[in-house]
Image: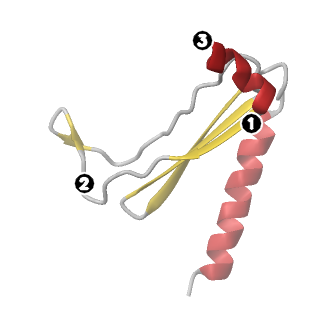
Amino acid sequence: PLVGQAARLWFDILVTSVPLPGVGLRLGGHPLTAVYPLAPLAPGQSLAVAISTYRNHVHYGLVADASAVPDLDVLARAVTDEVDSLIAVCDP
């Protein structure tokens, strides 16, 4: 409990990458086609960004405290636009 309460004193933004296996996963017998990573906010934190790669695709999830980050949709759109720009520049 002490560490959890102290987390907000150390940082207010969490960014994490969760590696997933490169093989196809199944859930209830059905192939998993996409993942939506989620990093929960600790008390006092403003933003969490989680990134996972699965079967040659990058998936990201954003979670925010609405009072600290009221325009999360703008950040999500900006991330998507920048990734699209990088793909366009880097794609042979």
Q: Secondary structure at mark 1?
A: strand
Residue 70 location (% of width, % of height): 84, 26
Local crowd at mark 2 within 10 Å, few (<14), some, or many (≥20)? few
**Given the image, on which type of amino acid does mark 2 rest?**
Gly
Residue drawn at 80 percent across, 41 percent down = 74
Residue at the extreme front: 2
Residue drawn at 25 percent across, 58 percent down = 23
The disc, 3 or 1, on the residue closer to the chain's N-terminal end is 3
The disc, 2 or 3, on the residue closer to the chain's N-terminal end is 3
Residue 52 location (% of width, % of height): 48, 50
Q: Secondary structure at mark 2?
A: loop
Q: Which mark is residue 1?
A: 3
Residue at the extreme bottom: 92
Q: CA distance from mark 3 to mark 1?
A: 19 Å
Taking the image as shown, residue 25 lies to the left or right of residue 61, namely left
Q: Which mark is residue 24?
A: 2
Q: Secondary structure at mark 3?
A: loop
The disc, 1 or 2, on the residue closer to the chain's N-terminal end is 1
Taking the image as shown, residue 88 lies to the left or right of residue 23, namely right
Residue at the extreme left: 29
Residue drawn at 50 percent across, 39 percent down = 37
- Structure colour scheme: secondary structure
**Given the image, on which type of amino acid does mark 3 rest?**
Pro
Q: Which mark is residue 83?
A: none
Determine which quarter of the picture holds residue 90. Answer: bottom right
Quarter of the picture containing the C terminus is: bottom right
Residue placed under numbered mark 1 in the picture: 13
